[in-house]
């Protein structure tokens, strides 16, 4: 007698709180019996080996609490970035190690049927988000599930001056948009979960107001397909938000990630 494989969706995140941008989808799928397996690919701290380790552990617990309360099993939450470790902001320098860690974390899951794979959009908002996009695409190709890979926007600065950014704004370059619909009440209540990430209150002071306004105006989560040809090109014309805000240039990101893209995305057919 054969055992039916678990139906799973895979969620790839850079930081402990990135799950908030896709949490309603995870909760809805969990309610339909689809198991969620989550990967966090940085430690969430810029100094993991020093005092920052305590921050990383605190962030792990914040995300664990939110995910478990929305239908994810504790054993399916993998904080891989802390184990390697990979500091916040440096994931594009550790693509192979993070990709291999994802492969290793999936092996004990046994035979699974992949329903959908979710990852941050290729949008130039944070270098870690774009790096996770590359890893999720590599894993989707390895699992023969590239057609089931969806990206969700977090924030980007397309066509905006200086430090300005938009939240939850899908780039037209990333293709057609589908929506996970919510009512305004559901969307606003959802974004107020940001209060549970107490270690990140400074970050959410900047992100929460525009997220709430977006929820009131367009209550839903945008999802787009992933095209592997996009990752060899700048996410959008003009300066990227991470170039202006985080001091990482696109040429630097592209140069460091080129070998990974050529071997694990274009070379893995």
Image (cartoon, rainbow, N blue to C red):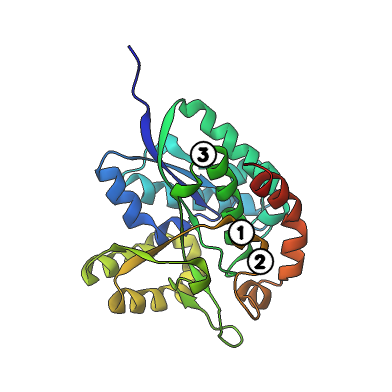
Q: Residue furthest top?
A: 1
Expressed as whole percent of the image width and height from the top left, the position of residue 253 reads: 72, 63
Q: Give the Cα separation between the discs numbered 1 and 2.
A: 8 Å
Q: Residues within 10 Å of mark 3 (few under 14, many from 20)?
A: few
Res 17 visible: no
Quickly name the residue at label 3. 144
Q: Are marks 2 and 3 in contact (CB under 8 Å)?
A: no
Left or right, 20 with respect to 79, comes to: left
Quickly name the residue at label 2. 233
Expressed as whole percent of the image width and height from the top left, the position of residue 211 reads: 39, 74
Residue at the spot 60% in from the left edge and 62% down from the top edge: 230
Q: Are marks 1 and 2 in contact (CB under 8 Å)?
A: yes
Classify 268 as above or below 161: above
Mark 2 or mark 3: name the one nearer the start of the chain: 3
Q: Secondary structure at mark 2?
A: loop
Q: Secondary structure at mark 1?
A: helix
Q: Residues within 10 Å of mark 2 (few under 14, many from 20)?
A: few
Quickly name the residue at label 1. 229
Res 242 visible: yes
Q: Give the Cα separation between the discs numbered 2 and 3.
A: 23 Å
Q: Residues within 10 Å of mark 1 (few under 14, many from 20)?
A: few
Expressed as whole percent of the image width and height from the top left, the position of residue 64 reads: 42, 46
Q: Secondary structure at mark 3?
A: loop
Mark 1 or mark 3: name the one nearer the start of the chain: 3
Q: Residue 120 versus residue 86: which sits nearer the camera?
A: 120
């Amino acid at each position: 007698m054969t055992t039916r494989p678990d139906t799973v969706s895979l969620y790839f995140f850079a930081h402990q709180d990135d799950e908030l941008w896709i949490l309603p989808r995870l909760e809805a799928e969990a309610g339909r019996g689809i198991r969620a397996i989550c990967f966090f690919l940085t430690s969430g701290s810029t100094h993991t080996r020093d005092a920052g380790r305590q921050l990383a552990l605190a962030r792990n617990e914040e995300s664990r609490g939110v995910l478990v309360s929305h239908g994810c099993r504790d054993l399916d939450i993998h904080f891989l970035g802390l184990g390697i470790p990979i500091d916040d902001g440096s994931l594009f320098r550790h693509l192979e190690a993070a990709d291999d860690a994802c492969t290793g974390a999936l092996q004990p899951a046994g035979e699974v049927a992949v329903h959908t794979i979710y990852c941050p959009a290729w949008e130039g908002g944070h270098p870690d988000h774009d790096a996770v996009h590359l890893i999720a695409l590599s894993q989707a190709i390895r699992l023969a599930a590239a057609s089931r890979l969806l990206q969700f926007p977090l924030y980007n600065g397309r066509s905006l001056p200086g430090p300005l950014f938009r939240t939850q704004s899908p780039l037209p370059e990333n293709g057609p948009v589908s929506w996970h619909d919510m009512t305004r009440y559901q969307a606003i209540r959802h974004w107020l979960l940001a209060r549970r990430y107490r270690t990140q209150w400074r970050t959410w002071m900047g992100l929460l107001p525009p997220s709430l306004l977006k929820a009131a105006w367009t209550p839903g989560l945008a999802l787009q397909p992933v095209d592997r040809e996009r990752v060899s090109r700048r996410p959008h014309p003009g300066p990227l938000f991470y170039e202006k805000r985080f001091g990482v240039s696109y040429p630097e990101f592209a140069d460091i990630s080129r070998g990974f893209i050529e071997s694990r995305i274009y070379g893995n057919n």
